[in-house]
Image (cartoon, coloured by chain):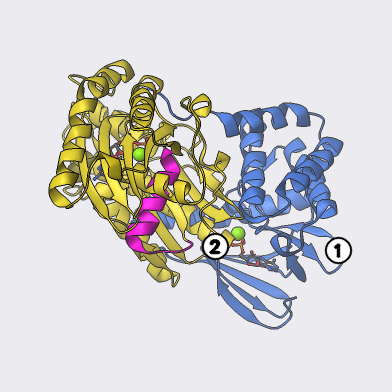
Amino acid sequence: MTIILGLEGTAWNLGAALVSEESVLYEAESTYKPKYGGIHPREAAQHHAAELKEVVSRALTGAKEKEAGFSLKSIDAIAFSQGPGMGPCLRTVATAARALSLSLKIPLIGVNHCIAHIEIGRWRCGVKDPVILYVSGANSQVLAYRSGRYRVLGETLDIGIGNALDKFARYLGLSHPGGPKIEELASKGTTYMYMPYIVKGMDLSFSGLTTAAKEAVDSHPDEKEDVCYSFQETAFAMLTEVTERAMAHCGKDELLLAGGVGANRRLQQMLRTMCQDRGGTFYVPENRYLKDNGAMIAYLGLLMLTSGVTTPLERSRVKPNYRPDEVEVTWRE
Amino acid sequence: MRSSNERFQCAEAIVELKGELVYKRRIEKRYRVREIDERIRKERTKSEAKIISEARRKGVPTPIIVDVEEYELVMERVDGNLAKEVIDEDVSERIGEFVGILHKNGIIHGDLTTSNIMVGKDNRIYFIDFGLSFIESSTEARGVDVHVFFQSLKGTHESHEQLKESFITGYKRTFSDASQVLKRAEEIERRGRYVER
Ligand SMILES: Nc1ncnc2c1ncn2[C@@H]1O[C@H](COP(=O)(O)OP(=O)(O)OP(=O)(O)O)[C@@H](O)[C@H]1O
Ligand SMILES: Nc1ncnc2c1ncn2[C@@H]1O[C@H](COP(=O)(O)OP(=O)(O)O)[C@@H](O)[C@H]1O
Ligand SMILES: [Mg+2]
Ligand SMILES: [Mg+2]
């Protein structure tokens, strides 16, 4: 059995998890909550620095209690999120990962956070070769695997959908993260208001929509529910459309949803309907594997280690703009 | 080669090939609310008909539109293959030339992929699927158009790097502002989207 300790901390959630080929042994996390406004990268990094020791030892203690015979010596490698993400957060977690790797004398593995989202989904859902819709705070991409890489077929040209939801939520005076609160309000909306719908081939844009939603609230302050509903309906229809276009272009009929915004029930419903109507199949993992989590980092680390990839110290610098198509996929045939 | 009658579901339409004609019907999408669905299907059907003809007038081969209805276009059938199935460096270079002509004339295709370009039995290149097209002459719009094409190459074609180079050769040949647009397309690809919140 191979066991990997994975560390995640690209943005607001700090996570540590122990994962083997068969299962997730134990997960621990600590979430940074901004006192006001959105995520402040430096504050989030300070949160991670202050909590890291605690979170890692909770994961280790948990694994010891759960798995007879588990000890520090059982760990085969340390995996960490090398990017993409916020520079200060990435550096904090990378420093901890390097220190652990040196003191335990085990390999270090720098993993791409986007691909970790994909691989944990493939693992939990048992899906082989899907088109992937990855929607989180900063990222909104449609990807598919082809000869050794995950290729980005389409993506946002400006801000990520989660970011758009969070920004709009802040405008409504709601705290971070705003996505779930918008979902709640939207479920009470009944009347659709016109919103700009911007799709360019398989790419999309959310900044115009966010501005329009803010203006709609200004002119209809008593109809927040309808504005949220219209915002969601528009944004998610755009996402579903580009996903369908990618499935048609690649000739694939399976879809995997990944990333924190994937927790949204309405988005899931739209994607499921789209797949049904074209004779495809829709897959989504449990919520805890949609948002940022340590288990996905550990799991991708495991795939990389068992296919012979580790990260020497001199190549372990963080990559705030690390793109998924930069990664050579060594663990798939 | 498609010669018999066929009916298939594409990204957003049901396409029926009947003899010499193609019936492209934008079907209802159950996943989105009616207000969005109807608006989009109507708008796209109308603008596709308009811009497909406009492109042909500027010298870019496209199917002739025979009839336009609220949600349906009837057009001439292109006898040939999707570029996706037959693309090589020569085809890609000629695609580049025609995209240069579109852009020079203020036309943005809006969905440039090898699923929306055909190579006829007559060996000519035909552009189809103008549903997302619009009229604009900004470097940004042109850059996104080219970026979308490059992404589609990467996503589906083994020799995407050579195909991209050939496209660029053709694009530069017919369009004098090509370099500026290509530079923008590179920027769009690299654009750091991990903005601080
Ligand atoms: N039910 C929901 N509906 C809509 N958005 C949601 C929902 N739940 C969470 N979100 C959004 O998901 C986002 C968080 O996603 P995730 O946990 O993947 O983190 P992230 O920091 O954005 O990650 P990444 O580094 O992958 O961009 C936030 O923008 C949040 O508002
Ligand atoms: N004029 C035509 N001649 C031959 N085949 C066509 C024609 N128009 C469309 N098709 C076929 O139908 C498919 C889908 O049409 P398209 O206009 O691209 O619709 P969608 O918007 O759904 O992608 C094309 O990829 C092509 O195979
Ligand atoms: Mg994430
Ligand atoms: Mg098409």
Q: Nearer the viewer, residue A312 or B144?
A: A312
Q: Nearer the viewer, residue B15 or B169?
A: B169
Q: Between tags 2 and 1, which lies in front?
A: 2
Chain A: colour as depicted: yellow
Residue A194 seen in render: no
| Residue A1 pos. (x, y %) | 34, 55
The dot on residue A248 is 2
Q: Residues within 10 Å of mark 1 (few under 14, many from 20)?
A: few
Identity of the residue furthest to the bottom in this view? B4
| Residue B118 pos. (x, y %) | 74, 61
Q: Which quadrant is home to the N terminus of chain B?
A: bottom right
Chain B: colour as depicted: blue
The picture quadrant for ligand 2 comes to bottom right
Q: Residue at x 63, y 57 (%)?
A: B129
Q: Which quadrant is home to the C terminus of chain B?
A: top left
Q: Please tell me in which quadrant of the rendered image residue A58 appears.
A: top left
B94 lies left or right of B111: right
Query: Where does the magenta region start and end?
Result: A112-129
| Residue B132 pos. (x, y %) | 57, 49
Q: Amino acid at mark 2?
A: Ala
B13 lies left or right of A215: right
Residue B186 seen in render: yes
Q: Please tell me in which quadrant of the rendered image residue B134 appears.
A: top right
Q: Please tell me in which quadrant of the rendered image residue A274 appears.
A: bottom left
B92 lies left or right of B47: right
The dot on residue B68 is none
The dot on residue B123 is 1
Mark 2 in CB contact with mark 1 (< 8 angstroms): no
Q: Is residue B22 above or below residue A129?
A: below
Task: Please tell me whether the stretch drawn in magenta is mainly helix, strand or loop.
Answer: helix
Q: Is residue A123 magenta?
A: yes
Q: Is mark 2 within 8 Å of ligand 2?
A: yes
